Image: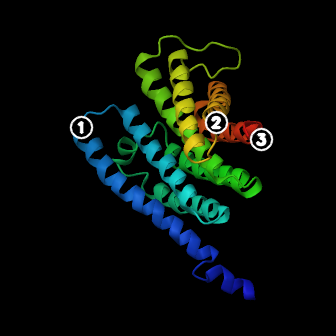
Amino acid sequence: MAWIGDVIAPSGLVAQILRCMGILAGYIVPAVLVLLPIRLFTKVPSFVFRKLLHMVAFTCVSLMIVAADSWQAAALTSVIVAVALYPLLAAIEGMPWYADLFVQKKPGEIRKSLLMLFFTFAGVVTLAWGVFGQPHIAATAILMWGTGDAQAALVGIPYGRHKVTLPLADGKKSWEGSLAMLGMALFVGFLMLVTLQGLPFPSAFALASAGALVGTATELFTPSEYDTVTVPLAIVVALLALLPLAG
C-alpha cells in the first residue's frame, strides 16, 4: 500500500493534477471574463468568437503541458476536464442563451467537441511525452493545430473564394483558408521548436514545414466535426517521426 502515499504526497500524482488544474483555472477564468463582454456587448462575428473560445482551449492546455511535472498529470487533467464538463454542459444546454453564447451549430455539438478535444489532448500528451519523452513536441503540435485552424477560419470564411475540390476533400474548405493555416502552423511550429525544443533554425524550419503540411492536408480531407482529433494527432506523429532527422 506504499504506492498510495506516493500518489497523495505533495509531489505525488494527485498533487500534480491539482497543480495542473490550478494552471488551467488561472488561465481560463480571466480569459472567460474577457470573452463574455466581447460576446455580449460587441458585434464580433460568431465565427470569430467561436475561434476565440478554441484559442482559450488549446493555449491553456499547451501552457499546462509545458508547466506539468509529468505526462500522467497532464493527460489525466485533460481527461478529468472533459469528463467533468460534459455533464455540466449537458445540464445547461437547454438554456435559451446557451446556443448563442457558445455559437453552437447543432444540439450537443459543443459538449461532443469538448469531449473529443480534451481526449485528443490527452492522447497527444501520452504519445509525445509518455511514449517518446517529448513534452514540448506535444505542446508544439497542439499549438500548430490550434493557431492554424483559427487562421484558416479567420481567412477562409470571409475571403475564401476558391473551394478545394480535390477527390475526398471535405468540400467546405477553401485554398485561401488552407494556405493561411499552412503559414500560421509553420510560423508557430518554427518558434516553438527553436525556443522550447532548442533546434537550430534550419532544422526547426524543416520540421515545422513538414508538420504544417501534414496538418493542413489532414484538415482538408477530414470532415469539419472530426478535425479537432485528426489534425493534432497527424501533426504530432509527423513531428515525432521526423524529429530524429532534425538533430
Place of residue 26 in the rendered image (x, y in percent of width and height, measured from the top left): 40, 62
Report how far apart the C-alphas of labels 1 and 2 lie in the structure: 31 Å
Q: Secondary structure at mark 2?
A: helix
The part of the image, by quadrant, that contains residue 1 is bottom right
Residue 43 sits in which quadrant?
top left
Visual colour scheme: rainbow
Q: Which mark is residue 231?
A: 2
The picture places residue 22, in percent across and down from the top left corner, at 46, 67
In the rendered structure, the answer to whether residue 192 lies left or right of residue 72 reads: left
Instruction: Kindly identify the residue that appears in the image at 57 percent across and 35 percent down.
Output: 190
Choose the circle earlier in sequence order: 1 or 3. 1
Residue 170 position, x and y percent, is: 62, 23
Q: Amino acid at mark 1?
A: Thr
Residue type at mark 3 is Pro
Q: Label 3: few (<14), some or many (≥20) within 10 Å?
A: few
Q: Which residue is mark 3?
A: 244
| Mark positioned earlier in the residue sequence (1 or 2) | 1
Image height of 222 relative to 240, above or below? above
Name the mark on residue 209: none
